[in-house]
Image: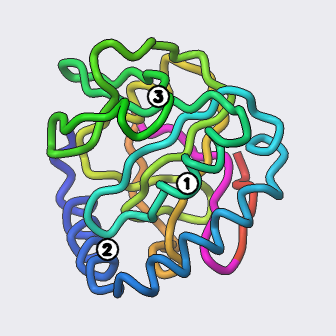
Amino acid sequence: MEGNPKKDSLRNLLLEKRDNTSFDLLKIASEKMQKKLKKIYAFKNAKKIGAYYPIQSEIFTQDIIQELISNGKEVFLPKVIGEKIEFRKIKDFSSLEQGRFDIMEPKDDCTTDNNLDVILIPTVGISPDGVRLGYGHGFYDKFLAENNTATIALTLEKQIVKNIPKSDHDVIIDWIVTEDRFFQTQR
């Protein structure tokens, strides 16, 4: 999708930095983010929440997902369909199976609903003004361009960079949550 050498170089640098984070530090950071999420009104008041199942060194979302389900919230995870993603409702982790890119995705019999209140977005890097750097496939940007949903990036503090080259199709993220702080971007 991308083909932007500056973004590719920055992506590789940030992935290497994130991949060098220990499991224990990622677990602690993820727990801190889970607590901070509850202070964001868009998340706290949401009924239908999009999340993701983490891969590699992404922020752990399993406890967040479990807590949401336990609290009676509707939880939706992305499923790759062709060149797009759609969100499907899960009841628990048994609703998941290994999908494209070796990512755990909802099974085919899970109900699709893209009209969500808020979505937790996986992030390789992000600027303070909400320009997100993903993996370069554009799945979330395509989805967000078609669906008006509040967005929250979960990211390590060290993944926030001053400037990320913005492409025309990039969708600005509403909130950034790190292990140290949370803030609304200047949309």
Q: Nearer the viewer, mark 1 or mark 3?
A: 3
Question: Vertically, is 72 above or below 39?
Answer: above
Q: Nearer the viewer, mark 3 or mark 2?
A: 3
Question: Vertically, is 177 above or below 143?
Answer: below
Q: Distance between the residues labelled 1 and 2?
A: 15 Å
Label 1, secondary structure: give it. strand
Quadrant of residue 31 within the rendered picture = bottom right
User: Magenta residues?
Assistant: 170-180
| Amino acid type at mark 2 | Leu
| Amino acid type at mark 1 | Ala
| Residue 135 in picture, x, y percent from top left | 26, 51
Q: Which residue is drawn at 44% across and 13% down?
A: 112
Q: Check the picture and name the quadrant holding the N terminus.
A: top left
Check residue 138 in the rendering and tell me which mark sits there, or answer none.
none
- The residue where tag 3 is placed is 90
With 105 as the anchor, is 175 left or right in this view? right
- The residue where tag 2 is placed is 14
